[in-house]
Image (tube, helix red, strand yellow):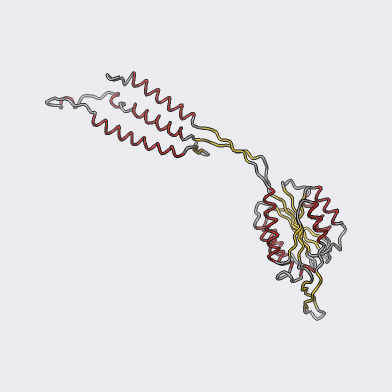
Amino acid sequence: MFENIEFANPKLLWLLLLVPLAILWYVLRHKKQEASVNFSDLKGMAKLPKTWKAYLRHLLFALKMAAMALLIVALARPQSSSTNSTSNIEGIDIVMAMDVSGSMLARDLKPDRLTAAKNVASDFVQGRPGDRMGLVIFSGETFTQVPLTTDHGVMLNMLGEMKNGLIDDGTAIGDGLATAVSRLKDSEAISKVVILLTDGMNNAGSVDPYTAAEIAKLYGIRVYTIGVGTYGTAPMPFQTPFGGTVIQQVKVEIDEKLLTTIANSTGGKYFRATSNQKLDEIYSEIDKLERSKIEVTEFRRLHEEFYPLVAWALALLLLEFLLRKTIFRTLTD
């Protein structure tokens, strides 16, 4: 009965303390007003029967106190509320398209680009429990590692197992983006996002990256692109014929013009990650940008609930008045 009830003027409920004080005053006053009779012996009156009026003589005061309590609660203005939301939020659908080509093993990020990207992406996934996530990996070809799912445990496990060598080497940016878009095109989520991370230039695959970007734009999918790698050269491990590893400096080549165009044409943004800290900051910024995209407009309607209390209080006062003028009428009335 009292669920979802709040008071517009809750401080007025302190006036309810007047009720026990009035009862105390009534009791003390009633004792002082007991009639006395100057008679030599009252034993003869002790066994006189009491009428029902004597038992109900305090009813009038009880009715007043009940009416008083109801009016005080009514003054505090109890209210119930009903809420209507203007949007049906199902969260954001996000597909991560991650480059797993051999160049992602470069060690300008620690311990290498691929591991750094996996760690930051895992933190990102854990920070968005209400969203559906998917994972697409690409190098010379592309593969959907995780379709859109709310099971973030699966997503985290597959991110942990992601490594170079699962598919042919190369950098098929267009194919990777097109595959990610295909996973989102039928989504009914309010916001559809691809986070595309790569460290190279498109040199493989069958889909032109600009065409993939146009398809993403057509389906209302924002693409955030991340270029991973320092400027200049980066230390890269190479296997020797004898089974060992040597580190050589290789030139860092990232097609920033392509990645910028893809992001801008779809309403996203391009980022350059030159360190672990910068990569972490990029994912944090994407996290904030996408949270700001969801707006829930909620209408809350308050309903005044004091009218029945006032009606009951008036009814009790009317009943008290009628009883006092009829059944409990006294000589002083």
Q: Is residue 326 left or right of residue 37?
A: right
Instruction: Locate residue 211 relative to residue 152 in the image: left or right.
Output: right
Could you tell me residue 148's position as x and y percent?
73, 53
Please tell me which residue is depicted at 27% across the width and 31% down the height of the picture. 29
Above or below, comparing residue 231 to residue 70 in the picture: below
Height in image: 269 above or below 321?
below
- Residue 112 at what x, y percent from top left? 73, 70
Q: Give the percent coordinates (x, y) of residue 323.
A: 35, 21
State the residue lying farthest toward the left: 40
Rendered position, 74 above or below 269: above
**What residue occupies the far bottom of the structure in this picture?**
242
Of residues 260 and 220, the one nearer the viewer is 260
- The answer to whether 179 is drawn above or below residue 303 in the figure is below
Q: Position of residue 102 (x, y in %)?
A: 80, 69
- Residue 259 located left or right of residue 80: right
Give the total of numbered labels.
0
Q: Quadrant of the C terminus?
A: top left
